[in-house]
């Protein structure tokens, strides 16, 4: 287990990134229950003291709060009694979808799939972000298709894999919204149930529960 000092440094770094308006930390702040519904932009507009950053770090380390993390690190054997561990923790990953028009893509995800638009950068826009609950998708403008025309459909390429707590209810919601569902709700051999939606740019998104 990393030393307490390492966790303290991670919390201070989180505060610094928030102060620098780094949009990448929005998803990490949303791990706090009281901020679960905020967009990245709203998360960056918050007052974000070190104590809240410590809460985030504690959750990411598997503890209910900072006090539990602190007690656990203080009770852990000294580093001379245990093998070396890596101090850097991976927090989250955000798929990047390639789109011809960032504004149009963001509007699609908002109006058809119930995401909120976190931000759109540039004039004209070249990058953006949409999110729904704990899932975030980034949107990047490209002038030409990234894949050979027809390859994504032919090879069944999945651009993002989104977990949901109620896949059947979400499927019904997207049916009602007339989303382009290219794979109906299916019980898979590996145990999960999923369906696939394709956006106007051909990006296939799997929703699984």
Image: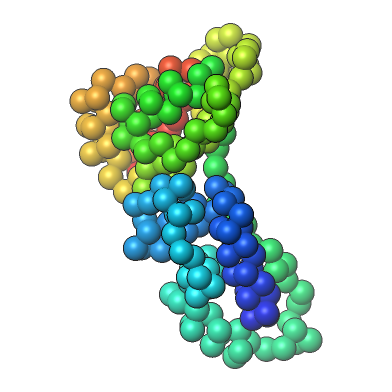
Q: Is residue 197 left or right of residue 80?
A: left
Q: Nearer the viewer, residue 113 or 147?
A: 113
Q: Nearer the viewer, residue 90 or 8?
A: 8
How many circles with numbers are drawn on the protein?
0
**Residue 13 picture quarter:** bottom right
Q: Quadrant of residue 25?
A: bottom right
Expressed as whole percent of the image width and height from the top left, the position of residue 87 reads: 70, 68
Closer to us: 100 or 89: 100
Towards the viewer: 171 or 97:
97
Residue at position x 43%, y 33% in the image: 206
The answer to which image quadrant residue 190 occupies is top left
Residue 62 falls left or right of residue 209: right
Query: Which quadrant is home to the N terminus?
Result: bottom right
Above or below: residue 69 compared with residue 179:
below
Q: Position of residue 114 (x, y in %)?
A: 31, 35
Q: On the picture, is 39 further left or further right than 166? A: right
Q: Residue at x 68, y 79 (%)?
A: 5
Classify the position of the C terminus by image quarter.
Answer: top left
What residue appears at the point 67 percent right and 89 percent down from the top-left corner? Answer: 77
Asked if 48 appears above or below 113 in the picture, the reply is below
Residue that appears at 53% across and 80% down: 69
- Residue 134, image x and y in percent? 41, 49
Provide residue 174's location: percent of width, then percent of height.
27, 28
| Whether residue 174 is visible | yes
């Amino acid at each position: 287990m990393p030393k307490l000092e390492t966790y303290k440094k991670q919390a201070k770094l989180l505060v610094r990134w928030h102060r620098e308006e780094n949009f990448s930390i929005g998803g990490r702040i949303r791990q706090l229950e009281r901020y679960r519904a905020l967009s990245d932009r709203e998360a960056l507009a918050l007052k974000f003291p070190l104590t809240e950053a410590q809460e985030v770090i504690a959750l990411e380390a598997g503890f209910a709060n900072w006090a539990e993390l602190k007690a656990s690190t203080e009770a852990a054997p000294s580093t001379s009694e245990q093998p070396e561990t890596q101090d850097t923790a991976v927090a989250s990953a955000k798929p990047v979808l390639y789109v011809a028009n960032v504004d149009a893509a963001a509007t699609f995800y908002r109006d058809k799939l119930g995401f909120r638009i976190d931000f759109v950068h540039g004039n004209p826009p070249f990058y953006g972000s949409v999110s729904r609950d704990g899932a975030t998708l980034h949107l990047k403008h490209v002038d030409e298709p990234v894949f050979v025309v027809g390859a994504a459909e032919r090879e069944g390429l999945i651009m993002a894999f989104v977990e949901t707590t109620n896949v059947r209810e979400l499927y019904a919601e997207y049916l009602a919204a007339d989303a382009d569902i290219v794979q109906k709700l299916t019980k898979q051999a590996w145990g999960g149930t999923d369906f696939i939606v394709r956006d106007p740019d051909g990006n296939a998104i799997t929703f699984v529960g």
